[in-house]
Amino acid sequence: MDITTKLKLIKQVGEEILTEEELKILLETKEHPIAYDGFEPSGNIHIAQGIMRAVNVNKMIKAGIKFKMYAADWHGWANNKLGGDLKKIQTCGDYLIEVWKTCGMDVNKVEFIRASEVVNSMEYWKKVMLVARNTTVKRITRCGQIMGRNDSEIQQASQILYPCMQCADIFELKADITQLGMDQRKVNVLAREIGPKLGWWKPVVVSHHMLMGLGKPVSNNAHIERAIDLKMSKSKPDTAIFMTDSEEEIKRKVNKAYCPEKIIDENPLMEYAKYIIFEKFDSMKIERPEKFGGNLELNNYDELVKVFKTGNLHPMDLKPAVAHYINKLVEPVRKHFEKDKKAKELLEKVKSFKITR
């Protein structure tokens, strides 16, 4: 695959790339650059972390990238997830990896790593210390955004340690590319500044879009902070679609979802069509009575935008179609956790845990 084609694929993943020129040079000089993404294992996993993550990882792999998926259990511990119970967090890490292996990710070409394995290295903690010594408490506190926290919510000393660890992760994992969500931007920029100063490298940042939750946008913030406020979150379970939700639950959630007529921007169902459905299916069929125009078959997202924007497709006709296609993608994962004994026991444990923000 030539460089232009590789760049095109990665640009489909990256809502923002720092920088495109650096990425081009990286692809020209290294046959299989390393990229990583990390997640706090902190409860049930939703479609943004499952299906959409698989779509993006597969595109990166197709572009020749070696991908590392990082279950950041110690980070969840530092951030007081699941009440700060490390054992529960590690159980969620096992669950996280089990979902990734069954949701369409090209797992034969992905390396799965747990933070609990990395922290055994003295070299890793040396990197953490070097990061901490080369920044300020004020800068690290501003990076609290990566934990879903604002500055005033950083209450524990462990939460100050977290961004230092995440920055060090990049260099410990030998990642040429940080391929995380837009909400992780601040620590990735810190890594780009610190890396060269410490004799390491300046990682390329490929930040993917953060999928909206199902609720009506209520944030007063702008740009990245607004996107963070609106993203799908397991702490708001009624506005998130989980990878093991039943068909009935998916229909219920989608049916009550925010979906204003003729509006494309900040419309969660249009987002799911763009970032998930049309990435996994060649077309989208809308079933409706003849008196409302009859069935529609849309071959791409642009066609959907056109009919929805003009009012030729009503939200009440779009909703059943979105629920149908999302359910088709979730179904193999749901069945795996129903039929596989070990997976079922793992899910039952995770569901018994009290989610803490």
Image: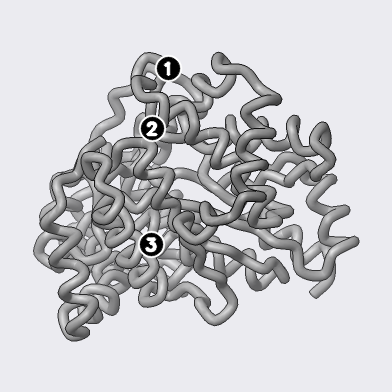
Q: Residues within 10 Å of mark 2 (few under 14, many from 20)?
A: some
Seen in the image, is 327 located left or right of residue 270? left
Q: Is 13 or 181 nearer to us in this picture? A: 181
Seen in the image, is 122 located left or right of residue 270? right
**Amino acid of disc 3:** Gly
On the image, the x and y values in percent for residue 220 come to 36, 17
**Camera sees residue 271:** no
Q: Secondary structure at mark 3?
A: helix
**Camera sees residue 98:** yes
Answer whether labels 1 and 2 touch (C-beta < 8 Å). no
Q: Earlier in the sequence, mark 3 or mark 1?
A: 3
Point 52% across, 62% down: residue:
69
Residue occupied by mark 3: 50
Answer whether labels 3 and 1 touch (C-beta < 8 Å). no
Which label sits in the foreground, 3 or 2?
2
Q: Is 231 or 337 nearer to us in this picture? A: 337
On the image, the x and y values in percent for residue 84 come to 27, 41
On the image, the x and y values in percent for residue 12 come to 62, 56
Residue occupied by mark 2: 148
Query: Residue 57, located in which quarter of the rendered image?
Result: bottom right
